[in-house]
Image (cartoon, rainbow, N blue to C red):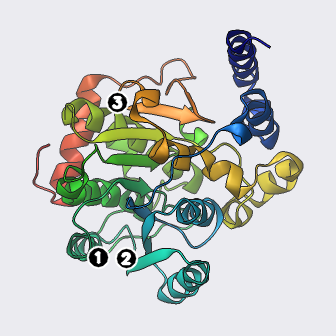
Amino acid sequence: MDPRLERSIASFGDAFIEAMIVPSWSGLGYAARRRLEGWDNQVPVPMDGKVVVLTGFTSGIGLAAATRFGELGATLHLVGRDPSRTSATAELLDRRGFDVRTSIADMGDLDAVRSIAAEIAGAHQHLDALIHNAGALSSEYVVSPQGFEMTVASQVLGPFLLTSLLRPLLEAGESNGRVIAVASGGMYPEKLDVEKLVASRDSYNGVRAYARAKRAQVELNVEWARRSGSGVIFQGMHPGWVDTPGVVKSLPRFHAITKPVLRSAEAGADTIVWLADVNEKELGANGGFWLDRHRRSITKVPGTGASQSERDRLWQWCEDNSGSGRQP
């Protein structure tokens, strides 16, 4: 078949699948795109000499991504919050012959984030990819050591601070470093509203707090890209509906209903690894948002688009409350 016809068929198939949320985000969508676009026939670029920092790696999507990065030859600097789980998982990866270093931090503790940033800077002369994967949906209201609700602390403030602190390393390599934010399709119904981002104990709803934090992640990805010029590459993605321990714990009813069509962790991690490894020209403009190796809109629900003034407010809020003190 003519390659151009194959690409046209694959593009039409992707658009058709994406128009229907359930098939697109399920394992069915991933399997269809993988076959239509011949991903198994594409040879990945070796990542020998590349340094990847990945948060949230001890299970699920993070572990699948760490494993694939290791198979491609990358040096891994992995961040976990539980010392025993971090050590045990890193040992498993080390047994496979991967080059693994670890740091311990809850991403919601800004002092711990500063500490691991110093560790990472002391261990590496440059970074090729920083992947913000840590983050859970919690039904309980928890306050961070600095006094912020933990969902927004760990998924907005912590990643913002770590990106700010590691940016010199991301700019130090031979090619542009990449920052990848792992968001969630659950952010689509929420509109960015800085005033509502931090919930009070009385108003807290775990699902909504998670969705609002993920919306903030996605909008910050756009803003980082706007402010970065031609330097660091910022991309966001959502992995679709993935069968992970986190989903089992936080959304048991959803998991029970959708389990037959959920994606594997490896499928959920595929676009993360692809974004870190693919030729820069394939990514197009900075600040993209992706599912299954395709750029997607960040607004699917009318009225959820963010204004530039609200993104500016979010940026200022993050600077003020993370103490990053550094304009890009």
Residue 74 in view here: yes
| Residue placed most toward the observer, 296 or 213 | 296
Residue 193 in view here: no
Residue 223: x and y in percent read: 28, 34
Give the label on residue 105, or none: 2
Of the image marks 3 and 2, the number of the one nearer the N terminus: 2
The Cα atoms of the two marked residues, 3 and 1, are separated by: 29 Å
Q: Amino acid at mark 1?
A: Ala
Q: Secondary structure at mark 2?
A: loop
Position of 298 compared to 92: left or right?
A: left
Q: Residue at x 54, y 44 (%)?
A: 274
Give the label on residue 60, or none: none
Dot 3 corresponds to which residue? 286
Q: Residue at x 56, y 86 (%)?
A: 91
In the displayed image of the protein, which residue is found farthest to the right? 260
Of the image marks 3 and 1, the number of the one nearer the N terminus: 1
The answer to whether residue 151 is above or below residue 35 is below
| Residue placed most toward the observer, 43 or 301 | 43
- Judged by depth in the image, the label closer to the viewer, 3 or 2, is 3
Q: Quadrant of the N terminus?
A: top right
Q: Secondary structure at mark 3?
A: loop
State yes or no: discs 1 and 2 in contact (Cβ < 8 Å): yes
Residue 177: x and y in percent read: 30, 48
Position of 238 compared to 314: left or right?
A: right
Q: Amino acid at mark 2?
A: Ala
Dot 1 corresponds to which residue? 112
State which quadrant residue 152 falls in. Answer: bottom left
Q: Residue at x 28, y 30 (%)?
A: 310
Q: Secondary structure at mark 1?
A: helix
The Cα atoms of the two marked residues, 1 and 2, are separated by: 5 Å
The answer to whether residue 328 is above or below residue 125 is above
